Amino acid sequence: MTMQSADYRDSGLDFGRDFVFGSATASYQIEGAVAEDGRGPSIWDTFSHTPGKVWNGDTGDVACDHYHRVEEDLDLMQRLGLESYRFSIAWPRIQPTGTGEANEAGLAFYDRLVDGLLARGIRPIATLYHWDLPQALEDAGGWTSRDTSFAFAEYARIVGERLGDRVSVWTTLNEPWCSAYLGYGSGAHAPGHTDGAEALAAVHHLNLAHGLAVRALREVVTNDPEFSITLNLHVVRPDGPTGAEAARRIEGLANRVFLDPMLRGTYPADVMEDTAAVTDWSFVHDGDLELIHQPVDLIGVNYYSTVTVRMWDGSGEKVVADGHKDMGGTAWPGADGVEFLQQPGPYTAMGWNIDPSGLEDLLVSLHEQFPDTPLMVTENGAAFDDEVVDGGDGPRVHDAERIDYLRRHFTAAHRAMARGVDLRGYQVWSLMDNFEWGYGYSKRFGIVRVDYETLERIPKDSALWYAELIRTRRIPG
């Protein structure tokens, strides 16, 4: 029997032959070419070009130039031995204004990407939406409008008709929590609104978009893919006598408001009650919950850190260490009385605490709640302040902290599997350094370094460690 270390630094743990090792990226973060081949503007183009919204005035105009370097990047994935690649499709490349005829050049790019993956023996995992909403749809209300949900279903149909004979896993949305609460509540993400009622309307319309898209995809795909949603479910630790109440409120807003309609066909009554002063939920129409509650084959789990909460007693300054940029609004409508405590370290460069036990707890909890629904880690990784050194035969990055982070979190995943969790795979975030949303290019999550001046790709030590894990199916010692 393998001895379990208290710090999750186990080695030699074996992953079966069927476990799928891969890596993940997002379109706006890596593609660049924002005004080429018919692509229309997205909310992130607008947001990043608005002074004061993104660190250093950085934008995704060039990013990693993946659009022009796709063959080079595919070869890199093959050299690392990736078995899957989770990428996102830029809606503004497919429909420049979010509606209307498809843009052939945009579809052709993803054709080349998917064919290139398959030619190298890599499973394509396609995410339809990773936050780059066409600006024209935002101008008409964005995710506060139910029309956007139906536009998304039509976009899903277009992409499904084109790629639906080759994609292995379809993911409708990436982290709708961020799209809704950071985009419309806190102001930290595009479009940068700070309105709690808008945020909750966006929650519902994103849920509706998911259900409509799954239904549309099922009607047009011709292979036998898996259909999924990727959620950044929060691991909420209660603190003190009021911790349980605070955790209930935050878990409701963060987790159950997505899981319950998607997997149970209902909205949690306590969340609607908690937020009654913010909105009357009249945006939920008859029949919507049936549309949202579509069968899925997989839940994608994104995990980075934990939060610890208690109810604020009203004295002193309220602590809101929830890990997100303060842009004036709140990501927690209806939970103004909740305090987010500073987490114990160590921390990544994002200021997020490192706690692999949270991943194990989350996977086990999901399995207990939804035992018949398989899981996949669709994002996990860490930003650190990498240093480039001369390796003798070229530049190297000795990112021991990232290797340690990944080792401990793969151990957590393995422990969850040993406890009966049906975990199908793990997509490390991120394949390469990229545009980190409001933090611009100041935070590096990649296992491959990108020199933003030359755009040279440099596999870090973590990439070589991961390649060894994939090759041997065992966590390297």
Image: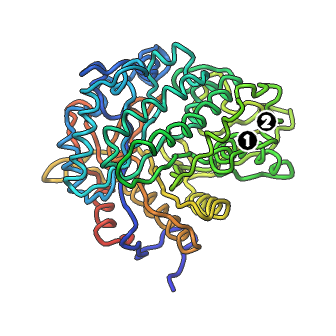
Regarding mark 2 in the picture, which secondary structure is present there?
Answer: helix
Q: What x and y, as percent, mark residue 83?
A: 31, 59
Q: Quadrant of residue 183?
A: top right
Q: What x and y, as percent, mark residue 48?
A: 43, 20
- The amino acid type, in three-letter code, at marker 2 is Met
Count of all numbered marks drawn on residues in the image: 2
| Residue at 65% from the left image edge and 61% from the top image edge | 365
**Which residue of the protein is positioned furthest toward the left in this rendering?**
393
- Give whichever of 397, 303 is nearer the camera: 303
Q: Residues within 10 Å of mark 2 (few under 14, many from 20)?
A: some
- The amino acid type, in three-letter code, at marker 1 is Tyr
Q: What x and y, as percent, mark residue 301?
A: 53, 52
Task: Please give the residue where the numbered disc 2 appears in the rendered image.
Answer: 272
Regarding mark 1 in the picture, which secondary structure is present there?
Answer: loop
Task: Please give the residue where the numbered disc 1 appears in the rendered image.
Answer: 267
Q: Are marks 2 and 1 in contact (CB under 8 Å)?
A: yes
Judged left or right of residue 213, residue 277 is: right
- Give whichever of 230, 335 is nearer the camera: 230
Q: Give the alpha-carbon distance from disc 2 to disc 1, as whole Å.
A: 8 Å
Judged left or right of residue 166, residue 440 is: right
Judged left or right of residue 412, residue 59 is: left
Please tell me whether residue 265 is drawn above or below residue 153 in the rendered image.
Answer: below
